[in-house]
Image (cartoon, rainbow, N blue to C red):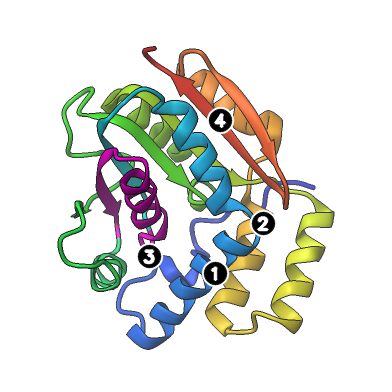
Amino acid sequence: MQRDYSASEPELMDLPDQDETVLRRDLENIARLNQTFGAKRAVEKIFNQMTEGLERLVMIDLACGYGDHGRNLIRLGQERRRDVTVIAVDFQFQTLRLAREATLAGQKMFFVQADARQLPFRPQATDLALCSLALHHFAERDAFTVLREMRRVARRGAACLDLVRSRFAAFCIWLLTTFIMRDPMTRHDARLSIRRAFSHEEMHALAREAEWPGLKQSKFFWFQQAVLARITA
């Protein structure tokens, strides 16, 4: 199954000036999918692996969407008496505003509108750079640039979780969005996302080309994978 990417056909959530009610519902659906199909648990596992031994840390949540991963990791840190600060980055201002509205006052989560291909941070500005289920939104060369930027701004580690493209995965997404999650934006974007995801081999090759040190690749249930870079021990 070839990757079906076209810059002329973006995912609807990437377009500006969306109906805010529709966009919020889509972001809530994605957060629900993250919890139901394992992305939340996968991010927690990666986070624990990459930040072991740190009592205080700053992380970038790149293409943060609704910010559900960042809020969950702050909560997880509080449970384990760890001071976690999240810099939530997204290109879409509407998305950032909705993520901020969903974040409790006092949580150490800060919102920055920026292009993932050109982050406004100095080298090694953060302990961990995380990107979850967003790399498939980019053309191959732009995806490489995103991974390179993650490597640049992280001083301890970088982690990118995404889907794995396959015909079976596309069929399962079709079933899910036909009978369960039928909101038009969610249906459109989910079906497009799985066709645009990278294979295991493509994902590994991109991270290797971006010179991720100590490169490791993990597989997770429900058509998900991750590449990890351990920059310092």
Q: Is residue 127 above or below residue 161?
A: above
Q: Is residue 92 above or below residue 138?
A: below
Of label 4 and label 2, which has the lower sequence position? Answer: 2
Residue 87 located left or right of residue 65: left
Residue at image point 16% right, 28% down: 122
The alpha-carbon separation of the residues under discs 1 and 2 comes to 17 Å
Residue with the mark numbered 2:
194
Residue 205, percent from left and from top? 60, 24
Residue at image point 80% right, 47% down: 1
Residue with the mark numbered 1:
32
Q: Secondary structure at mark 2?
A: helix
Residue at image point 34% right, 31% down: 128
Residue 45 located left or right of residue 96: right
Q: Secondary structure at mark 4?
A: strand
The alpha-carbon separation of the residues under discs 1 and 4 comes to 23 Å
Q: Which mark is residue 227?
A: 4
